Amino acid sequence: MDRFYQKAYRMLGSTGRSAANESKKLDDERKDVTMVITHFADLELLTVSIEGVKQCYLDQLGFPVVDQSEDFIRFRPAPHVTLTFRESHEPVSPAHFAFEVPYSQFDAVVRAVRSRKLLLARWPDGSDVNAFDGGKNIYFRDGDGHLLEWICHSYIREDVIAPHGASKVLYMREVGFPIGDVNGFREWLKSALGMKTKEESDTFNFVVGGTAHAIAASTGRRWIPIGMHALPPNMTVTFGVSEASFIERVRASLQAHEVVAESDGELHLMKYGYRFRLRCTSFDPGIPARLPLPISIEGKEEGRSDDQELV
């Protein structure tokens, strides 16, 4: 367990002067901790209709549009993440991704989702909300079939990140990576990008960096709750990082054909059939510890098993 995260997690049980002392120690030690991946900064997907995604994400979910052209549109669900779509003339393999919302506001978010007539994904018993130990979630699909999830956790402090917009998004929490070589992909995320796991399997893993939870999942499994085939989507995932030196270290570990492009503060690469960007951002690297995120500490989502994500 990372000592920085460990102390942050213990602070939950501290009060008064002890909490203040622990906070000061945490701030002092942060200077000695090299943070790597801090968050999902952008997710770029394909769509067959720019107007269709605009009607879904702007009109129904309230995500502001920050950039748009004839075949491109970018939304900002929260201050430190964007969601991008590029128009395609080819069939689209649906992606799965999830946004964290405040636990105290989850029921209100669900009421809003239902009122907007979104395409809800229901469980076999007909329900649309799933309650698990320490949290709740709800799934729905957009016009291209991408499977979105709104998820909340009772342990997430609600005074660290302000909820954003009508959908009350805190941050992008999960992106699914269906893949044939689950073990190889998982180990690359750990060795090259410094991400973490605790319990590992050949078919499903949470691999974590900061608030970003990459789901390394076998293409032989299906996304719940509708049993959707976990097909590898055509997507580009941008990880925010806090250190330019980290990007340099990753660059040095890659083979020439794996580097797509590079510039000051950013690296574009291709690995395991997925496109990645590493980008230096202003996202506070201390946020995961202050939330705090047990998975960032322990490497496993509390209260959720593998079968609660895929079947």
Image: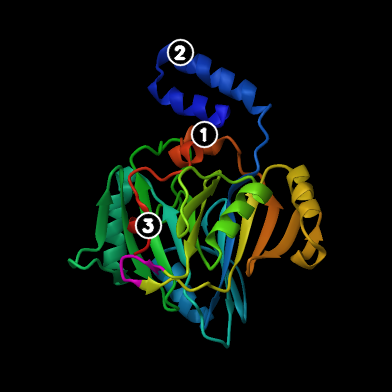
Mark 3 crowdedness (10 Å alpha carbons): few <14, some 14-19, many ≥20: many
> Considering only order in the chain, which callout, 2 or 1, is on the residue closer to the N terminus?
2
Q: Is residue 54 above or below residue 89?
A: above
> Contact, CB < 8 Å: mark 3 with mark 1?
no
Q: Quadrant of the C terminus?
A: bottom left
Mark 1 crowdedness (10 Å alpha carbons): few <14, some 14-19, many ≥20: many
* Residue 44 shown in magenta: no
Identify the element where label 3 is drawn.
Answer: strand
- Is 73 on the left-hand or right-hand side of 266? left
Rounded to the nearest angstrom, the CA distance separating label 3 from label 1 is: 22 Å
Which quadrant would residue 11 be assigned to in this image? top left
Rounded to the nearest angstrom, the CA distance separating label 3 from label 2 is: 35 Å
Q: What is the number of the mark on residue 289?
A: 1
Residue beneath disc 2? 18
> Considering only order in the chain, which callout, 2 or 3, is on the residue closer to the N terminus?
2
Mark 2 crowdedness (10 Å alpha carbons): few <14, some 14-19, many ≥20: few
The amino acid marked with disc number 1 is Ala
Residue drawn at the location 47% of the way across and 53% of the way down = 205
> Considering only order in the chain, which callout, 1 or 3, is on the residue closer to the N terminus?
3
Q: Which residues are magenta?
A: 221-227
Residue drawn at the location 46% of the way across and 53% of the way down = 201
The amino acid marked with disc number 3 is Trp
Q: What is the number of the mark on residue 150?
A: 3
Identify the element where label 2 is drawn.
Answer: helix
- Is 41 on the left-hand or right-hand side of 150? right
